[in-house]
Image (cartoon, rainbow, N blue to C red):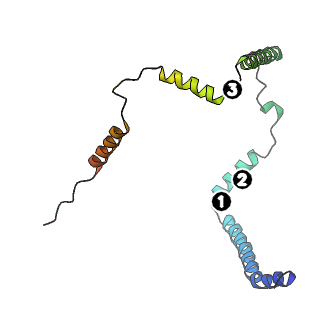
Amino acid sequence: MTGPEMNASALKKTGAPIAAAALMALGGCETALDTAESADPAETARIAEIVNANRAYPRWEDFPSVGTDGPTPGEVRAEVAALRADGAALQARMAALPPVDDATGLEADVRARVEAVPVSPDTQRTREQLDAFARDLRERARPPAPIPRR
């Protein structure tokens, strides 16, 4: 079944539970209203007092005044001009940089600069030394054998 037949069938199957849920919800609202009426009169009076005290719209006099500690338009204009000048100077410095068209040349240059820095012999390890160090750490991290129960 497709189209309107399927929708009608689905409505027949789900219509009764939906209607029952709607009636239960309306019944719940009625019960809530009955419960509110039978609440403590002192509490009801306090709630009414709070609602009535806050019923009026605020007046313009109640809003805080506009702050006067903000920057003037001239100060904002000067800051924007300084930022634009800094941006232009940065653009000029970037334009002066050599283009990186030769990736292998750049790699060779960086590799030469890195290799020019001396490395302590204590930090230089061969692959075999690193593997042995890792094996030793794994052995030390292995839990001991369980203790036999008597």
**Which residue is identified by label 1?**
41
Mark 2 surroundings within 10 Å by alpha-carbon count, few (fewer than 14), some (14 through 19), many (20 or more): few
Could you say which is closer to the camera, residue 141 or residue 52? 141
* Residue sitting nearer the eye, 123 or 31: 123
Q: Amino acid at mark 3?
A: Val
Task: Report the side of 110 relative to 56 (left or right).
Answer: left
The quadrant of the picture occupied by the C terminus is bottom left
Label 1: few (<14), some (14–19) or many (≥20) C-alpha neighbours in 10 Å: few
Q: Are marks 2 and 3 in contact (CB under 8 Å)?
A: no
Quick one: SS at disc 2? Answer: helix
Q: Secondary structure at mark 1?
A: helix
The amino acid type of the residue labelled 1 equals Pro
For the point 75% across and 81% down, the residue is 14
Distance from Cα at disc 1 to Cα at disc 3:
82 Å
Drawn side of residue 21 relative to residue 113, left or right: right
The residue that label 3 is drawn on is 100
Decide which of 8, 92 is in the foreground and name it: 92
